[in-house]
Each structure stands twice: as C-alpha cells, then as structure tokens.
Amino acid sequence: MTARGGYRVPERTPDGRRESRTKHGIPAVVAALALAGTGVLATGAPAAAEEIPVPAAVAPQQSGGPAPAELAARVAGTLEGIRAAERAGDSTRPAPEAESSGPSARIIGGKTTTIASAPWMAQLYFGDSLGNSYSCGGTVVAPTKILTAAHCVEGISWKSTGAVVTGATRVPTDTGRTDADGNPIVDFHGGEVRGVYRQWHHSKYDSYSFDSDVAVLTLTAPVKAKPLPIMKSSDSKLYKAGTDGKVYGWGRIGSSPTSPGSDRLKVADADARSDADCKKAYGADFIAGTMYCAGRAPTGKDSTTETTCNGDSGGPLVAGGRLVGVVSWGHVDCSKKGKYGVYAKVSAFQSDIRARVHDTNLSGHDHSADLLARKGDTLYGWVSSAKGTKLTRKYDLGDFSGVNLLVQADLNRDDSQDLVFRVTNGDVYWAHGETGPKRIGAGWGTHRQILVPGDLTGDDIPDLMTVEAKGKAYVYPGKGNGSFSARVSAGSGWDRFSMVRGHGDFTGDGKADVLSRAAGGKIYLHKGTGSTKAPFSARTLVGTYSTLNALVTTGDVNGDGRADLLARDSKNKLWLYPGSGKASKLFGSRVQLGGDWKSYNLFG
C-alpha cells in the first residue's frame, strides 16, 4: 500500500493499538412595497404598518458558540502545537512559517496569491483526543458551511476543539501578548473566526483507502466570504484530461517532514489527469469514480515540482469557476517522481454534500429535519430522532391563529429555521432569526400553492415557487437574503393538483424536486432540472396513495441525506416515507410516527 502524504493522524489497528498513517492534511410590525404585477416585495420601501402573528421564540437553534477569546486560544494553541511537533522532528503535520520569514513562492511550486482571488478559502485548526494539533484547508460553500476532507473531521470533536478562519490571506499570528483574562491575543489579519457546532463526514469514508473523503462543517454563525459554487451533476466535462484547474492552500512548502507550511495563501496549477494516468501511478490504491488526479507529475525534486502537500488537505480544486475536487492524499514524499496529488471527486458526492449544505432544522443539533404543526391555534415544534423513527413534541410556539399556509425554509442560508407563512388577507411573510417578519408577497390569498422546494435554478440558493388560481406555476429565484429575482414560468395546468410539495432532492442528482397529488390520490414526481428556462422535466407517476389527506415535506427527516415525505392518512396516522434517492423507486418502506394527528390543521 502506498504511503499517503500528509500529517499524521492516529488510528486504531484491529487489536486496538495505535498506529500512524499519513494524510494531506415575535407580534411585530413590518412594512414593504409591492412590485407591480408580481406580488413580490421590494426591500426597504415603507408601507402601511400592520400587526401579524408570529410564533413565540424557541430555544436557539445554534449555540452562541465559543467566545472570541476561546477561539483565539484554540488557534494559538494549535499553531504552537504544530510548531512544537515540527521542532521535535517527529511530525509531518503542517506548520505556518515564522512571523519573520518572507512568503514562500511555492505550495510545492505554485505561487502566492491573496484571499481576494479565492474569497471562499478557509483555514481549519483543531486537535484530537490525544492532544495533537492539526490544520487543514476548506471551502466556504454557504454562509455557515465549510466543505473539507473527511480525514480532517472523523474522530475529531470540532465543537470542543476546532476553529475556522475565513477572509484572510495569511495564517493567524500569535502576538505574544495576552488580554486582561490571560488569553492570547491573536492577529487574524482581517479574517473572521468561527466555531463549529455540527459536523458530518461521508458515511462511506474509509480511513485506509481514503475513499469518500468529503465532510461538511456547520459554523456557529455565518461568514461574509463569498461561497464557491459546487459543480453540477452535468459538469462532467470539467474532469476531462487536460482541463485547467487550480488548487489553493497554506500547506507545506517542501517534501521534507520538517518543511513549514506557508504563511500566505498559495495557488498551483492542477490540470485534470486521466484515470489511466492515476492508475499507473498508484495501482489499486486509486479508486476510479470517487477519486481523480490532477497536476503535472512530480519530478522527484521540490525545485521542479508543483503539487499539494501536508496541510493542503480539504482544500478545493477549482475548474470552470466551480468546486470539482477536495485535496485528499498523495505519496508520503509529496514530490515523489510520478506520484500525482489525489482528490475526492466532487461529482460522486455532490448530492450528499448538498444535502448537508441545506440541512437546516428546528433543533439544530443534528442533520434531521423537524416538523412544525398547529393544533387548534397553537403551533408546536416536533423534533425528529436521529434516524427518523420518532417525533417528539418539544416546543410550544404559542398562538398562530390567522395563518392559513406555513412553509419551513432557510431563505438566507444562516442555518436557522425560517418560516414562510400566509395570513388571512393574503399577504405572505418571512420570519427569520430575532428580527421581525418581512412581507415578501402581497395579495396571494388565491394562490393554490406556495412552497420553498430548494434550489430550482442551479445556483445553490433556495427559491420560492407558487401556483396561482388558474394553474400557472412560477419560480421566484432566491437571492439568499429573503428577496427574489423576477419570476419565471414553470408551466400551466398545475390546478389539477390538490397539493404541491417539495423540500430538497428526491432523486439523488443534487437538484431540488417537487411532488404533486392529483385526483384519486395519484402522486407525481416533477424532477428538477436546475434550469431557469425549464425548471422541471415531464412528470412521472410515483404511485397511488388514496388514503393520504396531508403531504408534508420538511427535508431529510431520517438524516440519511435524502429528501423524505411525511403524510397523514384517513385514520389520522402520520407516516414517514423515507426517500431512496432514486427516481425509479422514490420511497422505501414507510414508518409510522404517530396515530392521533386528526386535530392538527396546519403543517410546515
């Protein structure tokens, strides 16, 4: 087995001993003005104020996160731990250059650049249970989401040890000074630092083969950095041999185990290689389909090589302006002749990644979608168990009368559950965070359907969809801040459906889909295309479910990365129809979640 280039991560052998392998390492008053002809509202324009119903505040979906001083201490401790290991000469973990040294001209090879050229780059600092310190790269793919490598996440308690820095060209500097409480003062060089309160790595990640080496971290608060778009399922041409690519990172600048990491962000050419090239270099260690190689073959000398090395792990390979690869592994000698850098192939995991990028839920502590439901005039929050086998009523959100439509969403992608709801006069509001609701639609009382199915237009930002009284459907492309671009048509004839629902990707292609219910209980799939011009493919019949009288889509209820369906039947039982991620058979065997849901009159 070829040794993998990167910092050391302790792992358990079958007999439990430790060994080391190497890896790259609120009543409220609102005001707004309707846009003529659409009913969508412009921001910032005042109108007559009115009082509207808002559910009572619930427990914060995100913890406040570590205090800034705690995060600074984590970063300072990690940097010192890396340097200490380097001084001891027994570690290949990446270490930033000393403050006094100038910028290196290499990743290994490559050149220095600035965060302005790669605003989505993130620096990851963390420690393991043995007290070892590490750093990795990562990519901002949404305001609270960082994509990185699974080997930078598995076995790590990111909530208690980790810190993420964005918006900085340079590695943080411990100034050597302390604050009044004795905490180190760290210069983040204009960057933002955040904690992590939720983590995920791919369920099929293999720490021996490095297969499925992708992970997503959820930050304690949004960052300002502009996200990098994730490649689409149709972007296969970006892997064609010779396609121009760039890789970014702060990793080691030489192949020697004691070579320091770079103090400044660097970029290197990483044009795609064929699977045949990679197979020739690594034999059975290379897994075609989930891995790919990029960059010129190393020459055996640092001076003539341009490649990734320790500390670049988790960073992005960018082609065509999209994220196509995640730095994963390579030879232990980063400049070993003929041994390319190996990347996790994002196309193989883009659906799973997107499921975790869009996994906002009410409780916030897991990846499972929860449920809002009204009984009488009171709105309640039901929290799903980790595997979706049980719903527990946890939140009493108070009076929610005067509302006739409710949708759970996250229009601004801040990982806090939003509510989109319609009141009796036909106005539609967006309630989010601790601010008062914002009116986003006026005169929509006759609309048959209003839903937020996810990204229908291919930009990874949630969109709004409506079905008007005469059956015409429209998509309002989201801007990521609760406002929308001009609506586009999604066809006519939608008045034949008594229900239109959707929240996420039902078919496993990374594109949001919609379900509809027609006469006789027939349920259809409208497969999303990701195109503004024609948001859906021709509908296909899923099956006939004549006993169901309520369909609810809040996302991935059982936490497996696939959109699910909740449904109430004529006997008032609530069922989970778990999504399969396959269009050929959309749902697995249903699971009963309760037997007395008759009195619930509004679902999220």
Image (cartoon, grey):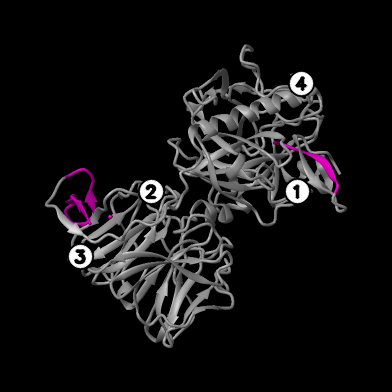
The residue labelled by disc 3 is 426
Reading the chain from its start, which is encountered first: label 4 or label 1?
Answer: 4
**Callout 4: 10 Å neighbours few (<14), some, many (20+)?**
few
The residue labelled by disc 4 is 87
Q: Residue at x 69, y 56 (%)?
A: 204
Reading the chain from its start, which is encountered first: label 3 or label 4?
Answer: 4
**Callout 1: 10 Å neighbours few (<14), some, many (20+)?**
some
Amino acid type indicated by mark 3: Gly
The residue labelled by disc 2 is 412
Quadrant location of the C terminus? bottom left
411 or 239, which is in the foreground? 411
Amino acid type indicated by mark 4: Arg
Distance between the alpha carbons at the discs numbered 1 and 2: 35 Å
Q: Nearer the viewer, mark 4 or mark 2?
A: 4
The residue labelled by disc 1 is 207
Quadrant location of the N terminus? top right
Relative vertical location of residue 112 with respect to residue 384 in this rendering, above or below:
above
278 or 61, which is in the foreground? 61
Q: Is residue 3 left or right of residue 171?
A: right
56 or 169, which is in the foreground? 56
Amino acid type indicated by mark 2: Asn
